[in-house]
Image: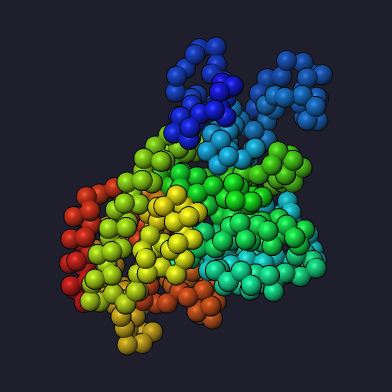
């Protein structure tokens, strides 16, 4: 790898950072499809498996293509190192398994992705890890929730799907005062807009399935952290549990990173325009988008996200009651002709979903209410279609009501 890596801008890092090319001098990073590696000697094999010598040994432990993706993502995040996994949720599981044990406590945002809430609040509880979920933007609530056995504070910013924003620097300080780690899920903003480690975060969580790939093709996840955390806490879990990212998936996301900043800029611009337009539509009760001045954390979001609101928004429909809200949301979603009804996000295609019955469907109604997920809420991941076409599609869908 060029020794100029740290001097390059993010745009250059996104297309240049990778492991060195092979003797064939390929310009596009190579895809290594192999489960094992021939060792130069028995002595070298023993040293490599013991971690005493650099070198690839077995596909579950590492791969040159995967290493290129990890190096590039770490560079974009301004992180010392990264480790990849098979999905975003497996990255969160690796983090929890690496940092926590029975008797430990986690403080997390109650506005997080539904599967994250279930994993931390229910699944980890089986193994003696307790948790407290607090309002995302209330720093005092985070502080009150910290206990003597708190080991991890974990937030998404912006959150999925209500786009709530937390003060990364303030929560980092709280965590460190308590002797805990602070992790940030940077899936919505990506390093193109926000770099949590520069604001004090210890760990950055990614679902590479979303904007890092950018075209909805593969599953991937990653953690960015110090080399010490990677080597001592997370790599041993990867080797034992096998949450390994497939080389082909790593290669796809590696290439996706090359256009990340361009895509985020263009999709965010469309998202802002769509959010502003939705605010003026009669059937819409409220729009959730950090780029809007009506957003409760607008100023903080602009400061942390390089003045850009991201490419995901949600809006709530006016309704009479819970049953009516769900009926109206389904009617709008079923009437869409250009945007896709799809629970993924971060695609170049505009994707829409009903969080209460999909991403947060496994939560109880009480948990959904605590998270602010109503039956009338629709999430939109804005793509790269013409803004006029997207607006026209939503216009006719809302008119169907």
Q: Position of residue 331 (x, y in %)?
A: 26, 73
Q: Name the residue rendered at 19%, 66% in the picture.
A: 395
- Kindly tell me whether residue 153 is visible in this rendering: yes
Colour treatment of the image: rainbow
Q: Residue furthest bottom?
A: 320
When asked about the image quadrant of residue 245, the answer is top right
- Rendered residue at 54%/28% (across/down): 7
Please, is residue 221 above or below residue 39 in the view?
below
Q: Residue at x 78, y 19 (%)?
A: 44
Q: Is residue 309 left or right of residue 54?
A: left
Of residues 374 and 251, the one nearer the viewer is 374
* Above or below, 235 relative to 32: below
- Residue 28, position as x, y percentages in the image: 44, 23
Viewer-nearest residue: 79 or 321: 79
Let me know if residue 161 appears in the view: no
> Where residue 86 appears, x then y in whole percent?
57, 45
């Amino acid at each position: 790898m060029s020794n100029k890596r740290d001097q390059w801008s993010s745009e250059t890092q996104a297309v240049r950072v990778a492991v060195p090319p092979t003797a064939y001098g390929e310009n596009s990073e190579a895809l290594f499809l192999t489960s094992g590696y021939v060792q130069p000697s028995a002595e070298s094999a023993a040293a490599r498996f013991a971690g005493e010598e650099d070198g690839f040994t077995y596909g579950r432990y590492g791969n040159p293509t995967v290493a290129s993706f990890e190096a590039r993502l770490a560079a974009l995040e301004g992180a010392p190192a990264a480790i990849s996994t098979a999905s975003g949720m497996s990255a969160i599981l690796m983090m929890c398994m690496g940092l926590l044990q029975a008797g430990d406590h986690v403080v997390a945002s109650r506005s997080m992705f539904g599967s994250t809430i279930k994993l931390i609040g229910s699944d980890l509880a089986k193994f003696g890890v307790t948790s407290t979920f607090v309002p995302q933007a209330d720093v005092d609530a985070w502080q009150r929730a910290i206990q003597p056995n708190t080991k991890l504070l974990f937030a998404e910013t912006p959150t999925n799907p209500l786009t709530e924003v937390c003060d990364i620097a303030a929560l980092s300080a709280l965590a460190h005062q308590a002797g805990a780690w602070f992790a940030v899920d940077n899936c919505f903003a990506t390093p193109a807009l926000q770099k949590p480690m520069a604001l004090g975060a210890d760990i950055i969580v990614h679902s590479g399935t979303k904007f890092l790939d950018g075209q909805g093709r593969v599953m991937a996840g990653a953690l960015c952290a110090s080399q010490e955390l990677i080597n001592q806490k997370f790599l041993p879990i990867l080797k034992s549990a096998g949450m390994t990212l497939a080389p082909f998936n790593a290669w796809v996301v590696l290439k996706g990173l090359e256009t990340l900043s361009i895509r985020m800029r263009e999709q965010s611009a469309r998202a802002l325009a769509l959010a502003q337009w939705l605010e003026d539509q009669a059937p819409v009760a409220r729009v959730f988008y950090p780029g809007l001045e009506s957003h409760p954390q607008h100023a903080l979001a602009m400061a942390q996200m390089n003045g850009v609101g991201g490419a995901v928004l949600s809006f709530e429909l006016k309704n009479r009651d819970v049953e009516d809200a769900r009926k109206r949301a389904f009617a709008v979603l079923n009437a869409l002709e250009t945007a896709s009804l799809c629970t993924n996000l971060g695609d170049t295609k505009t994707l829409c979903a009903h969080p209460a019955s999909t991403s947060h469907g496994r939560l109880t109604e009480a948990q959904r209410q605590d998270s602010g997920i109503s039956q009338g809420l629709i999430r939109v991941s804005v793509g790269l279609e013409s803004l006029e076409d997207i607006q026209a599609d939503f216009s006719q869908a809302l008119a169907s009501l």
